[in-house]
Image (tube, rainbow, N blue to C red):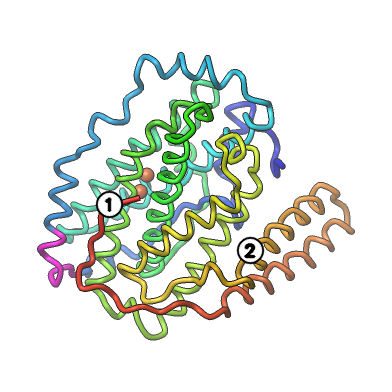
Amino acid sequence: MQTTPSIDTPQAAGLKAKEDTLLTPRFYTTDFAAMDRIDVSSLRADWDAMLAEYEGDNNHDHFQRTPEFAAEVAERFSQVTPELRQEFLDFLVSSLTSEFSGCILYNEIQKNVKNPDIKALMRFMTRDESRHAGFINQSLKDFGLGIDLGDLKRTKAYTYFKPKYIFYATYLSEKIGYARYITIYRQLEREPDKRFHPIFRWFERWCNDEFRHGESFALIMRAQPHLLRGANLLWIRFFLVAVYATMYVRDHTRPQLKAAMGLDPTAYDYEVFRITNAITQQVFPISLDIDHPVLRACMSRLFEIQTRIDAAKARGGAVGKLRQVGLALAGLATFARLYCLPVRRHALPAQVRMAPAW
Ligand SMILES: [Fe+2]
Ligand SMILES: [Fe+2]
């Protein structure tokens, strides 16, 4: 099911990237003076080891197209159905927007802080995200759908988040990004005939960058333990529910993409949640109980509501509008129900850093 107009011109791709809905990736800005005050000295050894990894830059040669890339696109992607083509383009545009969102945020922080630890980290992460965004954009350019990133940066709306919300949300999106990419990579390793586009072959080393970005935010949060207890647990719970639910609904609106890879969207999403839950125990003392039957029912209810919202939008007119309002309220109530479900609690490990072992 396609919720928006087809991506068949660079203008349409650009508009898609600028879309601001609950489900689309956003651009963020934050309080740079507060970022300047972050002190990671309690985890100095871990921090310096991590910066040394960035310095070593083991992916410096990874985001280059090989001569076979174009040939593989021509040979395999030319055979996909128009529906799959649209879902894949939608996936590329939303992935590019997320990668570029990180690139802009990290770069703005890097330019606006003096704190040498944060400045160095943000410079490395900007480098990585800019490679990621550029690599996806090259694939869009193969179809004549390259996005003008300068224009996107100037014209897409920005959301202001306090630093702690940036930490919760960005940490989660980096780790969930890792879990998504590695799950796809492993699946296509098992079933290479389902690899309908060469970009998936890049995902393994790519997602190690995302894993390390997540590690950086884990250290920042563990160095400020007040962010991980008391009333802040309510915020952590909110971001867990929001990020998981958004991913679930968005993936289910692209069923062809998963089916082409031999993945069932629901099974794929719960596998990604399972990996993310295992990783986030390094920093969050709570995790969502992803096996709770009510959680599972609410997730599919949210997707059903989204489907009906899309139908009401397509219908238009006063009735369509009224339906959209009713459905939005139903969505809110379902989200609240998810938020109130019991969570799993765990003690934080003494050793913060983890290895990307999936
Ligand atoms: Fe990235
Ligand atoms: Fe990242």
Q: Is 242 drawn above or below residue 59 in the view shown?
A: below
Residue at the disc numbered 2: 299
The label shown at residue 212 is: 1
Q: Label 1 crowding class (10 Å Cα cut-off): few <14, some 14-19, many 20+?
A: many
Within the displayed image, which quadrant is ligand 1 positioned in?
A: top left
Residue at 31% over, 48% down:
107
| Image quarter of residue 351 | bottom left
Q: Which image quarter is the N terminus in?
A: top right
Q: Observer-nearest residue: 336 or 259?
A: 259
Q: Observer-nearest residue: 272 or 214?
A: 272
- Where disc 1 sits, the SS reads helix
Image coordinates for residue 355, horizontal then vertical, percent: 25, 54
Distance (Cα) linking label 1 and label 2: 29 Å
Amino acid residing under circle 2: Met
Magenta residues span 39-47
Image coordinates for residue 147, horizontal then vertical, percent: 50, 32
Amino acid residing under circle 1: Arg
Image coordinates for residue 312, horizontal then vertical, percent: 82, 54
The label shown at residue 329 is: none
Residue at 35% over, 69% down:
281
Q: Label 2 crowding class (10 Å Cα cut-off): few <14, some 14-19, many 20+?
A: many
Instruction: State the residue lying farthest toward the front.
Output: 190
Q: Main secondary structure of the magenta part?
A: helix
- Where disc 2 sits, the SS reads helix
Image coordinates for residue 77, horizontal then vertical, percent: 56, 22
The tag earlier along the polypeptide, 1 or 2, is 1
Q: Please identify, in this view, whether the residue under mark 1 or under mark 2 is nearer the observer.
A: 2
